[in-house]
Image (tube, rainbow, N blue to C red):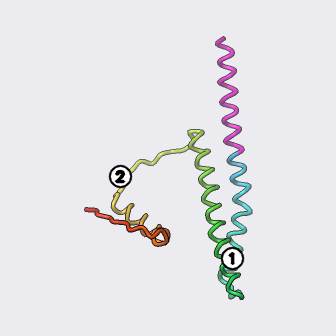
Amino acid sequence: MGQTINVAVEERVKSERMKNELITNVSHDLKTPLTAMINYISLMKNEDIQPDYIKDYIQVLDKRSQRLKVLIEDLFEASKIGSNNIELDIEKTDINQLLTQTLVEMEEYIGESKLEFIVNTP
């Protein structure tokens, strides 16, 4: 029975390792063409393209490709966390500064949401 448990544990560890390697490889394989697409989109944004609706298409492509990049990076990070292959760097943080930075970065989305944010920090 002990040997059966050891074999099951070894198989589980091997399976987890293979899963994490697959996620890492897929993430890398997706990031390579995505990076090229992002670079070409960036070049197109700098061109004087007519008609204007084409510029709108380029903006949509830019937003979607940036979102895909974030999703791929999140997938890779989740894989690292799942394999306990991540180092934590615990440090003190100024929560007021973090909140202010977040609000500035999300300003566009906050404006679009038509919500009123009331922030009262010391």
Q: Is residue 50 above or below residue 8?
A: below
Residue furthest out toward the left: 122
Residue bearing mark 1: 57
Q: Secondary structure at mark 2?
A: loop
Residue 92: image tag: 2
Label 2 is placed on what type of residue?
Lys
Callout 1 crowding tier (Cα within 10 Å): few <14, some 14–19, many ≥20: few
Range of residues picked out in magenta: 1-22
User: Which residue is located at x 69 percent, y 20 percent?
Assistant: 7
> Residue 96 versus residue 56: which sits nearer the camera?
56
Q: Is residue 4 located in the magenta-colored stretch of the structure?
A: yes
Q: Quadrant of residue 41?
A: bottom right
Label 1 is placed on what type of residue?
Tyr
User: Which residue is located at x 54 percent, y 44 percent?
Assistant: 86
* Image position, residue 98 (x, y; %): 39, 61
> Residue 113 versus residue 74: which sits nearer the camera?
113
Q: Are marks 1 and 2 in contact (CB under 8 Å)?
A: no
User: Which residue is located at x 69 percent, y 82 percent?
Assistant: 53
Q: Is residue 114 located in the magenta-colored stretch of the structure?
A: no
Instruction: Give me the C-alpha separation between circle 1 and circle 2.
Output: 43 Å
Q: Secondary structure at mark 1?
A: helix
